[in-house]
Amino acid sequence: AQSVTQPDIHITVSEGASLELRCNYSYGATPYLFWYVQSPGQGLQLLLKYFSGDTLVQGIKGFEAEFKRSQSSFNLRKPSVHWSDAAEYFCAVGRYSGGGADGLTFGKGTHLIIQP
Amino acid sequence: DARVTQTPRDKVTEMGQEVTMRCQPILGHNTVFWYRQTMMQGLELLAYFRNRAPLDDSGMPKDRFSAEMPDATLATLKIQPSEPRDSAVYFCASVRTGGAFETQYFGPGTRLLVL
């Protein structure tokens, strides 16, 4: 069975500083990987996704993620954070059957705090 | 801007009562998921449908939970009887499964509190 680990429950970053959120996955086949963001009281919004091709993926809001198969990692990065980036971030691995998308398995999330 | 809608947004009920949550997927999306979010367990997949047929409900407590999709524009999740441990945020998501690597779009969630 697949699993996702986000080792950091909380991360505090100063506004303007760089950010890296860690994600490790366990999956028997080629993984479909996603990063979602959740603001308080809101649903989840997709930041970026990866299946194949270039291992550096660009997403919305200036985020990027790098897939490293040897490390089973899919870390999320941003060169300079803004106060509006404060939120909960979830890494997920997707399953796909012959019929299409199946369910996502999520990590426990990383709560990002931005210091002024 | 197409969105997944969920009703109600908030629900407070007493233990033993029936709870029904509704989801309207994005028009044209043929796969609908139900997830539950709690502090302890995080986000968990409860059940999902493709072309209105249930595919997997192994994440759902069978004795009290039921999920249906009476038509392509409505999915429901029912809890009967509800218990305090069911308190959580329930999310619906939909995807247009025309191929691999499709994005799941999430609704705003139903926040359930069972007293």
Image: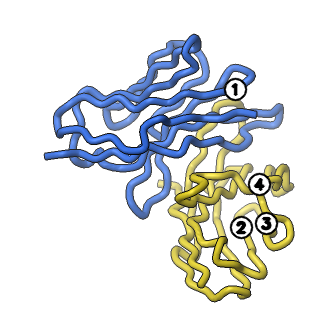
In this orientation, which residue lies closer to the viewer: A73 or A37? A73
In the rendered structure, the answer to whether residue A113 lies left or right of residue B56 reads: left
Q: CA distance from mark 1 to mark 2?
A: 32 Å
Image: A85 above or below B112: above
- Tell me: residue B88, above or below residue A67: below
Q: Which residue is mark 2?
A: B74
Q: Which residue has dot 4 on it?
A: B59
Q: Which chain is blue?
A: A
Subunit bearing disc 2:
B
Q: Chain B: what color?
A: yellow
Return the residue found at the far left.
Answer: A116
Q: Residues within 10 Å of mark 4 (few under 14, many from 20)?
A: some
Number of other residues with Cα within 10 Å of mark 3, as a class: few under 14, some 14 to 19, many 20 or more: many
Amino acid, disc 4 = Gly
Report the amino acid beneath label 3.
Ala
Rendered residue at 59%/85% (across/down): B115
Badge 4 sits on which subunit? B
Same chain assignment for discs 4 and 2: yes
Q: Are marks 1 and 4 in contact (CB under 8 Å)?
A: no
Image height of B76 relative to B104, above or below: below
Reading the image, the residue beneath label 1 is A27
Considering only order in the chain, which callout, 4 or 3, is on the residue closer to the N terminus?
4
Say yes or no: labels 3 and 1 on the same chain. no
Q: Residue at x 52, y 74 (%)?
A: B9
